Image (cartoon, helix red, strand yellow):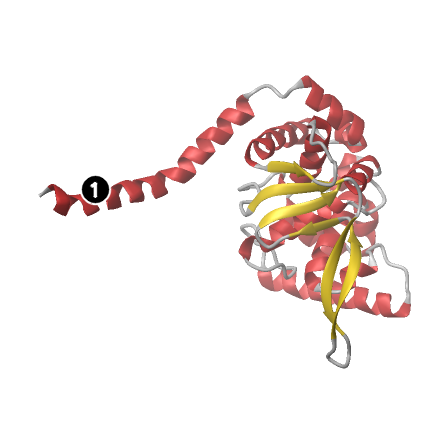
Amino acid sequence: MLPLLLPVIIGALLIGFLIGKPYWREYKRKKIKDQPFKKQWRKIIQQRMPYFKQMPADLQLQLKQHIQVFLAEKNFIGCNGVKINDEIRITIAAQACLLLLNRKTNYYPKLQTILVYPRAFIKAQNKQNADGVQYTQQQALSGESWDYGKVVLSWEDSLYGAEVPNDGNNVVIHEFAHQLDQENGRANGAPILGRGQSYQCWSKIFSQQFKILKQQAESGEPSIFSYYGATEPAEFFAVASEVFFEKSQKFSSEYPTLYQQFTQYYKVDPIHWS
């Protein structure tokens, strides 16, 4: 009888585990959030992120709680001589967690590891010219988001992005915006939208602004968005996310309909943080 029941018992235990896993994960996260935020961590945020003090108190608390969960669940690895310490972990986590405020989050569920290089790192990329000939080109990158498991960052650029919060350039925001975009597959500029937000409306407005940026890039017309965002929709979403958090007033003034889509998606309005 026992051999016959064994598969049933194992199946029941497996089902119970799968059903209970999300509740156990949320329980652990709540326990982490309930812990006091370390004073030295708060000091790092205040030193490295100038606009933290200007954020509303409730968002400051949310950010600190998100940082605690992020640090508990993600692994940092130093590359090319980088020794991971609290300054690196907190500075990167604080910027990454800006994208999670005021909304239900699973903390970048595909992400496991953040690789940190001292400065821009070299990557060999396979390319093809107009004649179909393939070649390898080396490119210096300040960050990279993999489809599954990893984000790669330059510490020098991550630090600069935190300390200069109003230039519209932030490699951590950029790469973690890609992570959000990749939650439902390959990055394509269409992340998982929240309840009440229309994919049809997002697509229409986003596509229009992407087309405008491509035209600006071709003609050399100035834009608040980096021309790099004109390369593909995924890059436009990441670039626009940088500008949303760092040049919100100008973004809102020049592209109000797109800005509204981003406020609905990110559930915050950074205009009120300055």
Image point 69% across, 23% down: which residue? 41
Image point 85% across, 45% down: which residue? 167
Image point 8% across, 43% down: which residue? 1
- Kindly tell me whether residue 39 is visible in this rendering: yes
Q: In the image shown, does 205 or 143 lie closer to the viewer?
A: 143
On the image, which quarter does residue 93 sit in?
top right
Reply above or below: 255 against 171.
Answer: below
Image point 13% across, 47% down: which residue? 4
10 Å crowding of disc 1: few (<14), some (14-19), many (20+): few
Reply above or below: 131 against 238.
Answer: below
Helix or strand or loop: what does disc 1 sit on? helix
Image location of residue 228, percent across then percent down: 79, 59
Residue 215 in the figure: left or right of residue 41: right
Circle 1 sits on which residue?
A: 9
Reply above or below: 255 against 74.
Answer: below
Question: Can you name the residue that lies furthest to the bottom here?
Answer: 131
- Kindly tell me whether residue 268 is visible in this rendering: no
Give the residue type at disc 1. Ile
Image location of residue 192, percent across then percent down: 57, 54
Q: In the image shown, does 32 or 101 lie closer to the viewer?
A: 32
On the image, which quarter does residue 90 sit in?
top right
Residue 42 in the figure: left or right of residue 192: right
Image location of residue 152, percent across then percent down: 69, 46
Residue 255 in the figure: left or right of residue 188: right
Image location of residue 204, percent across then percent down: 66, 66
Reply above or below: 36 against 118.
Answer: above
